[in-house]
Image: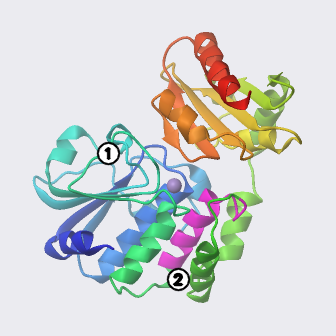
Amino acid sequence: MFEEGKKLIEEAKTIYITAHINPDGDAIGSTYAMYFALKKLNKDVHVIMPAYSDIFEFLPSISICEKSIDCDKYDLLIGMDSSDYSRIAVSKEEYDKARKVLMIDHHQKSNPYGDVRYIYPDISSTSELVYDIISYLNIPIDNVMASYMYMGIMTDTGSFNYSNTSAKTHMVVADLINKGADSTNICKMLNDTIKEAKLFLLKKTIENMEVYFDSKVRYSYVDYDTINSLGLDEEDAEGMTNYLRMVKGTWVAIYVRGKKDGSFKVSMRSSGQVDLSKIAIMFNGGGHPRAAGYTITGDLEVAKNKLLNAIEAVIK
Ligand SMILES: [Mn+2]
């Protein structure tokens, strides 16, 4: 399953691993698990992650990452959790310095890159895919690698709640716990600890909630100034969509937040009746049937109406 990728890794000496900008738990989990795995193969391996949310600061050795690729040519770039070239956290110049590029992801996307591509939309998370790859490469999994993969799988499956969670996912997670994944602490830090500012973000989300189509669709919007004045970063400003989706009778929940550059990030969650990956692709985004998103660059009201029309056409 991973023969070509294995060859790329075997032939490489200097390897840089990166993920999408504003990395979530899965992007960080898959990147660092691969980093520690390749270290065991005595590779000269680096993580390029220009920024990450401080909610992840408790993770072991997370600060080893670098902001940019300073060498001239290098052997291999591995892009994690983003099959969209425009979202990876390296510049075009840094990308072009790679002799080979390997892409590992579980999103269905329209802008893939790399010499070898592993895209498995049926696997829960990139971290679960990395588990399969590390196992294929016969690299022993230590407690730090196990913790990173556990964290990535747990966050991308909504604590094993979403439909992307398979029986195999649970078996992988059982193995990771056997290998020392710090599951209790990871869940406490990421699921059971929030900044007070996040409560105020939730308040704003509820205040701004709009309801459409016999309450099947819930929409809310928080502007950038509000998020900024609460002191929340990009990753902190996420997570509101689920509260909207949890309301009984909701088919689709939409949470839109303003970004610093004037654009808007749209996060959508479905209870299963609507395939949101198809909706997101209509707007140049991507994701999964139950969780997808995209970016709005023009007028928000116009974009909102287009989105509501697209959803209405499906739920009717
Ligand atoms: Mn992911």
> Which residue does the numbered mark 2 point to in the structure image?
143
SS label for mark 1: loop
Compared to 142, does 244 lie above or below? Answer: above
Image coordinates for residue 115, horizontal then vertical, percent: 20, 55
Which numbered disc, 1 or 2, marks the residue closer to the eye? 1
Compared to 127, does 239 lie above or below? Answer: above
The segment highlighted magenta reads 145-161
Quick one: 215 or 227, which is closer to the camera?
215
Q: Quadrant of residue 12?
A: bottom left
Inspect the image, locate mark 2, and give the three-letter code of the amino acid beneath it: Asn
The yes-or-no answer for disc 2 within 8 Å of ligand 1 is no
SS label for mark 2: helix
Quick one: 114 or 11, which is closer to the camera?
114
How many numbered tags mark residues here? 2
Q: Residue at x 48, y 19 (%)?
A: 297
Image coordinates for residue 228, horizontal then vertical, percent: 63, 28
